[in-house]
Amino acid sequence: MTTSTSVEAISRIEDPPSTRYLPLTKVFVVGIGNALEFYDFLTYSYFAIQIGHCFFPSTQTTHGLLFSLATFGVGFLTRPLGAIVIGRIGDRVGRKPAMVLSFALMGTGITGLALTPSYAMIGVAAPVLLLLFRLLQGFALGGQVGPSTAFLIEAAPPHRRGLYVAVQYITQDFAVVVAGVVGYGLSHWLSPGELDRWGWRVAFLLGAVVVPFGVYLRGTLPETLTAADRDTSQPRQRRVPARLLGLGLLLLMATTVGGYGLSYMTTYAQDSLRLAAGIAFGATIMNGVGNLIGDGLSGLCSDRFGRKPVMLYSILLLLVLVLPAYLAMNQFPAAATVYVATSVLCVLQQLFGNAALVAIAESLPTAVRSTALATLYALATTVFGGTTQLVIKLLTEATGNSLAPAWYLTGALAIGAVAVVLMRETNPASTLPTSSQQ
């Protein structure tokens, strides 16, 4: 086998035997752990304004928000390191121990963040501790995507890979809905001062409480990595074509910029559209609901019609609709406009993102699938996704144009569309010709 071997051929040759396939209900255990991790990590984004007030003393809310968003971005710096360390454990020791380790580290980070005193209580030590716990969270999450996605690909029958991997996104986006409901409830029950002082901590502690439960659930999973998969004497089984790495990075760039750009809607509604916090957290709920719908559709459609058609049509629709959606929100800044725009864009975003992740994962050799996917994902999120919300805020301030987020998202999606066109079909159940595969 050479580096020019088709990705579909690699995928078929390295498929695990059918005795390792797991029922979809069992696979949801992976998704539950994934949901808890992403709830913890993304809740920071939804409470960025309140965290800025707590940890960054300034009479200028804008400055506090910028520092808060910058700290959110810092959490992405350790993702590549976590991807390499934990991803390698996933390829050498097993998918299960790697998933348990990433989850335990995430639990430590979220608990520490929730219990860190404010700047008013301990001074500069507060933002320093905040920074350290965000770095730990980034390290843990960097090692989460590779082993868990590899596990789902290997646990799935070939004709159900899209649906199985969709479980990861479905449970992740269910966590978004939960985070939105929690934020919505807290913003209605508490005064702005209470939300700044301690309300946001409640949201984090709710995630911390279920960490032991998640560690236990992941520990009950079987292992999908066999001794043959760990064999390092076959270097050809560990090679990844440079073209695939490049296209995978561009696809994940578009996915993460789109995802984090749309998750900024909660802050955007408050900061740019000047809507109340309750309405803004309602946008978070719509974000999660739209994502959930897109996840399920993407899994089913990519298994039925192929990864590439789903990616192509969804990203083209996104390119057409992003700017009009933001124009509508600015022209009619109300709950209904924001909710409709958010949900429609999120459905399309997840149609694209889930199919892209499946296509990349099933293209990679089993022996390096965890490390390679984790590293690609971590690089994309660190360089592009982690900076998206800060860049959007800076662009909005620099230009004075509240449509800056739409233009930034459009640019990233356009690049992603080019990568989709160049990507080959990878669905092993597809009836498309395979002679011209990568």
Image: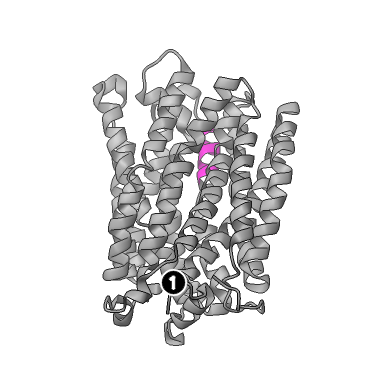
The quadrant holding residue 383 is top left
For the N terminus, give its image quadrant. Answer: bottom left
Residue 181 colored in magenta in the image = yes
Let me know if residue 70 appears in the view.
yes
Q: How is the image coloured?
A: one colour
Residue wearing tag 1? 3
Q: Is residue 297 visible?
A: no
For the residue pair 138 and 318, the one nearer the viewer reads as 318
How far across and down, in percent of the image, does residue 297 sit?
A: 65, 63
Main secondary structure along the magenta-highlighted residues: helix
Q: Residues within 10 Å of mark 1 (few under 14, many from 20)?
A: some
Magenta region: 179-188
Coordinates of residue 64 in the picture (x, y in percent): 43, 22
Secondary element type, mark 1: loop
Q: Position of residue 226 (x, y in %)?
A: 32, 80
Instruction: Name the residue at 61% across, 20% down.
Output: 400
Q: Amino acid at mark 1?
A: Thr
**Residue at 66% from the left image edge and 76% from the top image edge:** 432
